[in-house]
């Protein structure tokens, strides 16, 4: 009975140490991981989501920049429609 108690106590102490180490390192590692993720995405893509505007339940307006041209897209459950297309940015 005492062996079981000491093994359980040792397991709980080890688990506590691991959880404390995770919480201590998380504030330092999270910004690094976020910065690496965003820099890689921005470099590889020519499409950038600038703004999302919720209009109501299941309705959104999206501002999207594709190769320097601005598009405003309306999205609902059943359709996607281009509302505005920036013609000034076209070659």
Image (tube, rainbow, N blue to C red):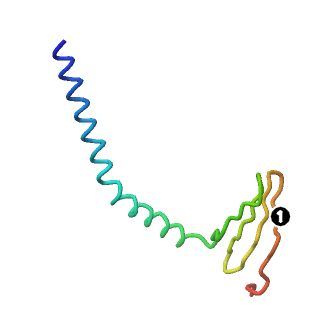
Instruction: Return the x and y of residue 53 as percentages of the image width and height.
Output: 71, 64
- Residue 19 vs residue 87: left or right? left
Outermost top residue:
1
Please state which of residues 84 and 20 is positioned toward the viewer in this rendering: 20
Q: Residue at x 75, y 65 (%)?
A: 61
Asked which quadrant contains residue 12, the reply is top left
List the single residue furthest toward the front: 56
The percent position of residue 35, horizontal first and vertical second, equals 44, 66
Residue appearing at x 55%, y 70% in the figure: 44
Q: Residues within 10 Å of mark 1 (few under 14, many from 20)?
A: few
| Quarter containing the C terminus | bottom right
Quadrant housing residue 64: bottom right
18 over 56 or under it: above or below: above
Q: Is residue 51 shown left or right of residue 21?
A: right
Q: Residue at x 67, y 80 (%)?
A: 68
Q: Secondary structure at mark 1?
A: strand
Left or right: residue 64 compared with residue 35: right
Spot occupied by residue 25 in the image (x, y as percentages of width and height): 30, 54
| 63 over 91 or under it: above or below | above
Q: Is residue 69 above or below residue 63?
A: below
Q: Nearer the viewer, residue 25 or 79?
A: 25
Seen in the picture, residue 26 relative to 61 is either above or below; the reply is above
- Residue 56: image quadrant is bottom right
Q: Quadrant of the N terminus?
A: top left
At 67% from the left edge and 78% from the top edge, which residue is drawn?
Answer: 67
Instruction: Quickly name the residue at label 1.
Output: 81
Residue 80 x %, y %: 81, 60
Left/right placement of residue 31 relative to residue 58 reads left
Looking at the image, how many numbered discs can be counted on the residues?
1
- Give whichever of 13, 84 is nearer the camera: 13
């Amino acid at each position: 009975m005492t062996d079981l108690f000491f093994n359980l106590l040792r397991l709980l102490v080890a688990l506590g140490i691991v959880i404390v180490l995770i919480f201590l390192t998380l504030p330092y590692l999270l910004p690094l991981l976020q910065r690496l993720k965003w820099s890689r995405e921005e470099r590889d893509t020519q499409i950038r989501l600038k703004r999302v505007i919720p209009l109501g339940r299941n309705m959104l307006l999206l501002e999207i920049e594709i190769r320097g041209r601005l598009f405003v897209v309306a999205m609902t459950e059943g359709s996607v429609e281009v509302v505005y297309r920036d013609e000034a940015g076209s070659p």
